[in-house]
Amino acid sequence: MGNSMSYRKWTSERFSIAGYGLILLAILFQSMSAVFGKYASMTGPDVNAILNVFYLLSISCLVLQAVVWQKALCRFPLSVAYPLMSLMNFVVLIAAYIFFGETITPGNVLGLLIISAGIFVLMRGKDTP
């Protein structure tokens, strides 16, 4: 009996880790879509959206994000998973700095700290797998 209990605990932890991995992938795909969308906008208005490789990459990332997100929602309640998607703001801010040379202002940092505090408050006391 002791082995079955530890097996269930291991399986539960494994799925929990996999669930968080799926949420991180969803964040990554949605962030990549934002970066590719920015690149698509920089190609100019004369480029046909259907032929714009960055636009197609952006759409592809959104499709992948939707698939991964559905898998994550099988492991977590929406009220737990959705607040974690706010972490995308961190990824996009850093990507904007790295890829486009955008400035990170004190207001950006303060806003992210407020978002982080909000995520902490929402997640506190939630039952996770």
Image (tube, grey):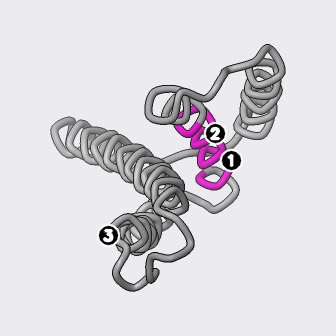
User: Farthest residue toward the left?
Assistant: 3
Q: Amino acid at mark 2?
A: Asn
Q: Amino acid at mark 1?
A: Pro
Mark 2 or 3, closer to the camera: 3
Q: In the drawing, what numbered circle is on residue 106?
A: none
Out of 91 and 100, give the one closest to the viewer.
100
Q: Residues within 10 Å of mark 2 (few under 14, many from 20)?
A: some
Magenta-highlighted stretch: main secondary structure?
A: helix
Give the mark nearest the N terminus, 1 or 2. 1
**Where residue 100 sits: x, y (%)?**
51, 35
Marks 3/1 in contact by CB < 8 Å: the verdict is no
Q: Is residue 42 left or right of residue 63?
A: right
Q: Secondary structure at mark 3?
A: helix
Q: In the drawing, what numbered circle is on residue 53?
A: 3
Spatial CA distance of label 2 from label 3 is 24 Å
Give the mark nearest the N terminus, 3 or 1. 3
Q: In the drawing, what numbered circle is on residue 89?
A: 2
Residue at (60, 49) in percent of width and height: 85
Residue bounds of the magenta highlight: 81-92
